[in-house]
Amino acid sequence: MELIYEKSVPGRKGVKLPASDVPTAKPLDPALRRNKAAELPEISELDAVRHFTNLSRRNFSVDTNFYPLGSCTMKYNAKVLENAAALFAPFHPATAILPGGEAFCQGSLGMLHDLGSLLAEITGMDEVTTQPLAGAHGEMTGILLVAAYHAAKGNKAKKRYVVVPDSSHGTNPASAAIAGYEIITIPTAPYGDMDLELFKAAMNDEVAAVMMTCPNTLGLFNPHIKEIADIAHSFDALMYYDGANLNAIMGKVKPGDVGFDVIHVNLHKTFGTPHGGGGPGSGPVGVKKSLIPFLPTPRIVKEGNGRFSIETARELSIGRTANFFGNFGVMAKAYAYIIMLGKAGLIQVSEQAVLNANYIKERLKKYYDLPYDMTCMHECVFSASKQAENGVHAIDIAKFLIDKGYHPPTVYFPLIVKEAIMIEPTETESKATMDAFIEVMIEAAQQAETDPGSFAAMPLTMPVTRLDETKAAREQNVCCAG
Ligand SMILES: *Cc1c(COP(=O)(O)O)cnc(C)c1O
């Protein structure tokens, strides 16, 4: 496809502005004026519209096709949620933090406050901060809260370690390391969860926190979670819950009820905003009572008269972790999503998401190796190890799917599964869509046996075909392809 610069014709214009009839207040300092025209494409409005519309048609999205990207919960998010967020568009986010500004935004403050209460109810926590801007940012905030808790007890120097299972998302050990902790990694047992005996052996008084994802990145719910929490607490270690997989358990299990002290949730996975769109995210953090004094400020406080005010400082607070109260639009969508579905709706979301993943798992396990063959939660993890014997790897299956109009599942994650193919259908897909996808996955498995050589050049239908990925990362020349 031509670049917009290649469509440029000297002198062609999209817009003609009338000559200014307002006197120039102060001429611009000549030193600041450019002496050469900006190198912008000269193009008509229609050409610009066509250029960008046609580019957008090459995008892949949930609005166009099935997007089973494991760990990302790429569900369909209803357009009405965007309308809900747009209702707040005229409102400037700084209003609330200007002196006396609260009076002008009681509705917005109330919505954020209510969203915090709803998330606390869903997760079994006592209070929530909406500040963090992503899942990983929520993790960092949560671990800083853990650090502040230990520091307040005079244990800052003693508490040196954070325990994570080897199935964890890479952001978990990274967040703990950024907060200054050393990492103890516990291997996964053949039953698909953190090895309980190795965990017990690793625990000691110097552990500050245990970070878990439940269900974990294999899509498996850990039946020993309460026991693990009790052991951690006996060493005064706090339990951190990575809530990115909340879509599997909403209305079924509250992490706060099974021993977790701090949790982040990904609003941009579970609650109305897609993950991975490059757009804003939101990773609110919920805590149990013991951590409330350390929450980031400012906080929204509900007064006895029902009005909302802003508490700017708290003695033990870890301070501000983001501007304002976080990404407001994402939270408006999450709020609308939760009240639109209600409790019964959220439970149905989890049940349907789990049912869909198990359906795909059962139908594909004849064709792909299933390293942990048990009931899964909202996603299932296969391995392309059988196909790899013929030289067809997980990445080749992914490229095959692109040619068939599907976004590939997550591949090569979790790291503990060789040739991993991680499929998360989400609750919003119909049986017909999943059946069509399953047929294509079966076709890929068959072709891997009959014609393994055919995969090397895939994808064949895209503007950019198979790249040398190492070279592409080093020489980022986006102009030459296609
Ligand atoms: C997505 C994800 C994260 C990180 O969330 P971001 O918003 O991408 O920073 C952390 N843990 C798990 C298990 C995830 O799936």
Image (cartoon, rainbow, N blue to C red):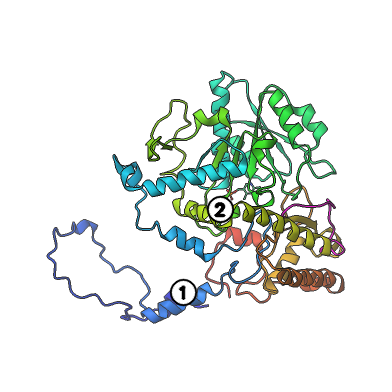
Q: Nearer the viewer, residue 55 or 476?
A: 55
Label drawn at residue 73: none
Residue 398: % across, % down: 72, 65
Tag 1 residue: 52
| The quarter of the displayed image where residue 45 is located | bottom left
Amino acid type, label 1:
Phe
User: Residue 63, can we see it?
Assistant: yes
Residue 140: % across, % down: 56, 38
Which of the marked residues, 1 or 2, is nearer the chain's N terminus? 1
Residue 420: % across, % down: 76, 55
Crowdedness near tag 2: few (<14), some (14–19) or many (≥20) residues, C-alpha within 10 Å: some
Tag 2 residue: 338
Classify 320 as above or below 464.
Answer: above
Q: Which residues are magenta?
A: 364-378
Q: Nearer the viewer, residue 404 or 349?
A: 349
User: Residue 137, can we see it?
Assistant: no
Residue 250: % across, % down: 65, 49
Ligand 1 closer than 8 Å to label 1 CB: no
Taken as a whole, is the magenta stretch helix, strand or loop? loop
Q: CA distance from mark 1 to mark 2?
A: 34 Å
